[in-house]
Image: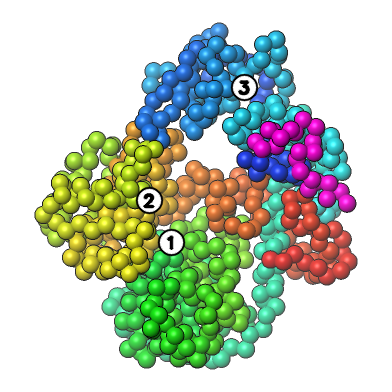
Amino acid sequence: MFLHELRQPAATLRGAGPLATAKLARIGINTIADLLIHYPRDYEDRSTLIPFASFTDDRPVLTIAEVSSHEWFGFGRMKTLKIRVRDESSEACLICFNRPFLERSLPVGSTVLVHGRFQFRYGEIQSSSFDVEKIEAGKKPEAGLLPLYPLTEGLAQGSLRRLVRSALEMYGRRVEDEIDPELAASRGLIGKAQALSAAHFPLDQDQAEAARRSLAYEELFKFQLGIALRISARKAQNLERKPSTGILARRLIERLPFELTEDQKKAIQEIGSDLDAPHPMARLLQGDVGSGKTIVALISALHAVERGEQSAIMAPTEILARQHAAVAASLVEPLGVRLAFLSGNVEDASRPSLLSALAEGRIDIVIGTHALFSRGVAYRSLSFVVIDEQHRFGVSQRTALYEKGRLPDMLMMTATPIPRSLALTLFGDLAVSTIRSVPPGRKPVVTHLARQGNESRVYEFVRKLLAEGRQAFFVYPLIGESEKSDLKGAEDMAKRLAEEIYPEFDVSLLHSRLKEERKSEIMEEFIKGKAKVLVATTVVEVGVDVPNAAVMVVEHAERFGLSALHQLRGRVGRGEYQSYCFLVYSEGLSDDAIQRLKALYSSSDGFALAEEDLKIRGPGELLGTAQSGSLRLTIADPIRDFDLLKEARTDAFALVESDQIGRAHVIPSIEGDWRLRNREGREVPET
């Protein structure tokens, strides 16, 4: 079978010796198929040379130059190689972030071909986004339109190009089409074999784009077909719903010490409608930090309680789960609702009775961590499942809790808003409720950027707030200092803050290595105001609610992602006081780090920041973390290809709704996923 040949090791190709095979494996290329779908990230047009002196913002350099020197700047893990090169027109600098190996592969005096976008910075022509290839003596560089691939240390573009050519010559022509010919023609797509060849070695940019578009549509179609099948399967389930009057939910709303926002009311109504439908709910509730998603979930859970069924609310950390349980207990227990907290650290003496009560139905709502789906935990009638901060749980973990019930309703929540293009790709089978507004009376957090070396001014500002009775968070990327970097660690800084900077205030330390009981004690002390300063790692990133905390200081802020920084900033500004966030950054920032910090400084809108995060990190990285275990995009981009995504979604859903998918036979494809082959049989892919 031809597919079996594509799954042969890459080592079977001519020129793929043991050393080359090991290098290929480092970038995920193990088989012939892996090599064929290792698409170029760009192309290099070698038809015309463009020297350093002729660069513009929209005109990349392509020139032959000589390496004149190697230099280094920065310290520790931030130490970066700078290679000076000179062509006939001028000198330029290659800033080699995360590429120290170029010092060895491009020795001083060697001749190189340089391709990339350059700019004038710090008094010199330089680039941090470039490709460079050493030209051996007596040889000429390849001409024409050439692919530029993602590489690893020791793997050159020329070597990879030769291996891809070999794979295409031996197997490329026999790759079969995976999209129905009529559908492909209606969307202006080219065949799979032709697309693969043109994607790697196009004659011109138009042919490269036609190939990319065809391959991207195929990827997106597979995603959307899986989504459509899941929706169809769920709607085919017929649940016998017990009546729910909504009395408990109304009574809880009446007891709240605040007024729900319009967005919260709308979300409660949408979830309620789902809970009355004859098929299981699958809904995503998204809202910015502090927008009030948890109370929406708790009110919704009361529908299951009224029916005599059980609800489970799972949080990613014990600190957050305990906080949810404490707040929920104060609200629902006066209504006669039986609530329990369960984690892996519940004492052995109380655990058997708790598990027994859960299995016998004497607990209505259980709030906890991963322990909720652990072995030995059984439910009498679990019908409503809430996954808080859903991106922190893997697919298998969410499924494990879901399978504790019989077709339970599922509500996933996230404080990291998801851009629409990505939502249709990742969560296209979920209905979405959105809370954009925040509770009235809250003041926006004022954000400041501070260069490392100016911390004393930040510390003095914090001192004034502490003297006024407020509290502060100090967050660091590491628990302890590392010998391999000059980053500050939480342990050493907690000692310094307590002994040298704020000796008059109580300082606590919280990090992931502490036992859960100790974490809870420390957090409780901070919530009650006993400790004025909490030094921590990102263990406080989600869910910690301390209204009196009015300042967040994040040191080495460039080491954190945009989403994490926004989440950390959201730990303050949850009370009546004006709050502040200081992002202290180091020297030698990468372009991405500069973009992240500028975005945080300019906006507090989580939805706008989510779009910016997608632009900075790219869909591949976000898909890789959010869709663990699912098909990953290798060539499609949900932002760039949003119109194509909508077309693929329309076509996939139309196929499922026409019921032709039920007569489709599914066989594995080149990517190792599945595809439609003909209309006989009733096999469908497992989703």
Residue 415: give its label. 1
> Mark 2 = which residue?
565
Report the span colored magenta: 1-23
Q: Amino acid at mark 3?
A: Glu
- Nearest the eye: 240 or 369: 369
Q: Residue at x 78, y 53 (%)?
A: 669
* Main SS class of the magenta portion in the image: helix
Q: Residue at x 87, y 64 (%)?
A: 679
Query: For the residue marked with disc 1, what is the amino acid?
Result: Ala
The location of residue 625, given as percent across then percent down, is 54, 54
The quadrant holding residue 151 is: top right
Residue 641: x percent and y percent?
63, 47
Near-viewer residue (128 or 188): 128
Residue denoted by label 3: 133
Asked whether residue 12 is drawn in magenta, I would say: yes
Q: Residues within 10 Å of mark 2 (few under 14, many from 20)?
A: many
